[in-house]
Image (spheres, rainbow, N blue to C red):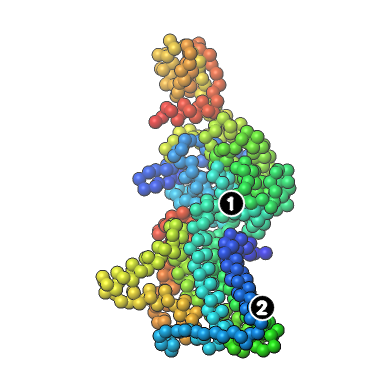
Amino acid sequence: MTTLVQVTDLSKQYHSVMAVKDISFELRGGQVLGLLGHNGAGKSSLIGALLGALSCQGDIQVCGLNPLNQHAQLMQHLAYISDVNILPQWMTVAQILRYSSGVHPSFNIHKAKQLLGSTQIALSTKINSLSKGMKVQLHLSMVMATDTKVLILDEPTLGLDLIYRETFYRQLSEWLEGGERTLIIASHEVSEIAHLLTDILILKQGESLLQGNLDSIMNDYFIIDAVHQQQSIIEQFSPIGSQVGLGSSKWLLKSQYRLQAESLGVIMNPTLQDIFIALQKGEA
Amino acid sequence: MHPSFFMLEKELLEHKIITRLPLYLLLIGFLMLAAIVINMGSANDISMQFNYQGDMANNGLDLTPGISSLISFAAGIVSLFLSIVYLSSTFRKERQEGSLMFWRSMPVSDLLTHGVKLGVALILIPLICSLLLLCSELFIWLISLTQAQHFMGLLTELSLFSITSDWLLFLAKMMLVSLSILPLACLLLAVSQRLNSPLLMVIIGAYTLKLLSRYVFALDGVATFIHRFSTLPFTLLSSPQPLVAFAQVSWSYYLLYYLLGALCLMVSLSIRKHGELNIRAMFARS
């Protein structure tokens, strides 16, 4: 698998605020990176840099191209869907498809029309009059009709109902299986995207809190559910986070303490959301 | 087909005023003329009177060729108005409505985007307005043909040859007007990427600079420079010999004017590329 995205020591500063600090990662075909973090964590700046919309320090290569200096060539292989609808509202669906087919060499207008045929989106409809779910569906259909190698999603399902979300993620999985492609998803909805991810990058105030392969990260942690009386012993294992319950508490611990903690309570596997919340709360 | 064709088409779809205003004016003109023909019965009943105060020799308006000259001047003003309105709104609109990221997600270079937008403002709009002139003169010519006597004394010169030559002369004049506003066009493209009222800011900025240079710094050259280029398009439109009017401005002024225009284009490209003005990157070789 070839490297599709390579980010090395990326930093972005707005006046005195460091939006992104020394971020590095690499993505190959088939990998799905979850970009997690609260508002202001630096996700949008990182995405802006990957899209070539922001000038930053460090080096970015997407499909071997520099997003800033080789923007037009890169956009043949890179697509982006955001929570804020970026489609021009004044256009009709037919007009946007015609425009895309005219300027995008790898856009297949017949495929886009075929994909839209299975939805309730009519070609003569103005984008302005489509619901939010339909707009996302239209944008995704356009991406799927393009031979895109890298897709960046920024809170794509925010405000969508459950039916649209299910359809969206199903179509996304189909797109991902269609070739050597990589996907970057920025989201607050950790549990919703967890099943898609192969890798994660958790950001806080512009810095990387945790990053790497999701499976190995999940193996690095465990949860122990123990009575409150065990608290003093468990605190010796430097818990990453804790959640107080009725009569017992849950602690998130590193796997190195698993053998020592086994006798203290019930051991459970954490979810990505557990790790995300614990890290966000813990390291202020 | 080249992507620029689809980009031009998109600009026309987005800024409908470019096609609708000339069409609307044409329809109004047709209706007015049709009403005159129908209501007056005989064209000989119509008398026209022009009142003018001041020195006729220096007014710059040549009315001797009659109504063709007036239509040409009006079409030129409409073209200039549309170009300025388009230039000050095209980048601002996509920024304000939030579609900027969509247009930037297309494999189109910033240079081509600027080229297309300048092409629309300086070539396509004058071309559309030239059709306004062409259609109007053709319509009047047709009316004069269908009347037993020529329609009004002002139209005696109209023939297919004069209509064609009027149209070609108008196109040539408009190309000079476009050349005269090219640096201003680049300035408006740059300013509209950052400000919400680019035209107002450019006008206020120009007048402030003019007043400051004349009355505070006693630099008459700057005030003259601003005055020359702010009135040049109108001078070209109203002059019977636009080429002479164009050549009357000093070459050193043109040099400075086009250098400033080139700088504005670089600034506009830089803002488009970096999302902000990046002076270091503007002069760096990518």
* Crowd around label 2: few <14 · some 14–19 · many ≥20 (10 Å): few
> As displayed, is residue B8 above or below residue B131?
above
Chain letter of disc 2 in the image:
B
Can you see residue B285?
no
Chain letter of disc 1 in the image:
A
Query: Left of A178 or right of it: where is B96?
Result: left
The residue nearer to you, when weighing B50 against A52, is B50
Quadrant location of residue A175?
Answer: top right
* Crowd around label 1: few <14 · some 14–19 · many ≥20 (10 Å): some
Kindly identify the amino acid type of the residue bearing the numbered disc 2.
Answer: Ile
User: In terms of secondary structure, where does tag 1 sit?
Assistant: loop
Residue labelled with disc 1: A89
At x 42%, y 14%, the residue is: A231
Q: Are marks 2 and 1 on the same chain?
A: no
Query: Left of A87 or right of it: where is A124?
Result: right
> As displayed, is residue B103 above or below residue B152?
above
Q: Which mark is residue A98?
A: none
Residue A202 placement (x, y as % from top left)? 49, 35
> As displayed, is residue B248 above or below residue A231?
below
At x 55%, y 52%, the residue is: B99
Can you see residue B31?
yes
> As displayed, is residue A215 above or below residue B15?
above
Kindly identify the amino acid type of the residue bearing the numbered disc 1.
Answer: Gln
Quadrant location of residue A140?
Answer: top right
User: In terms of secondary structure, where does tag 2 sit?
Assistant: helix
Query: Left of A110 or right of it: where is A203?
Result: left
The residue nearer to you, when weighing A44 against B46, is B46
Residue labelled with disc 2: B38
Residue B225 placement (x, y as % from top left)? 37, 76
Quadrant location of residue A206?
Answer: top left
Q: CA distance from mark 2 to mark 1?
A: 45 Å
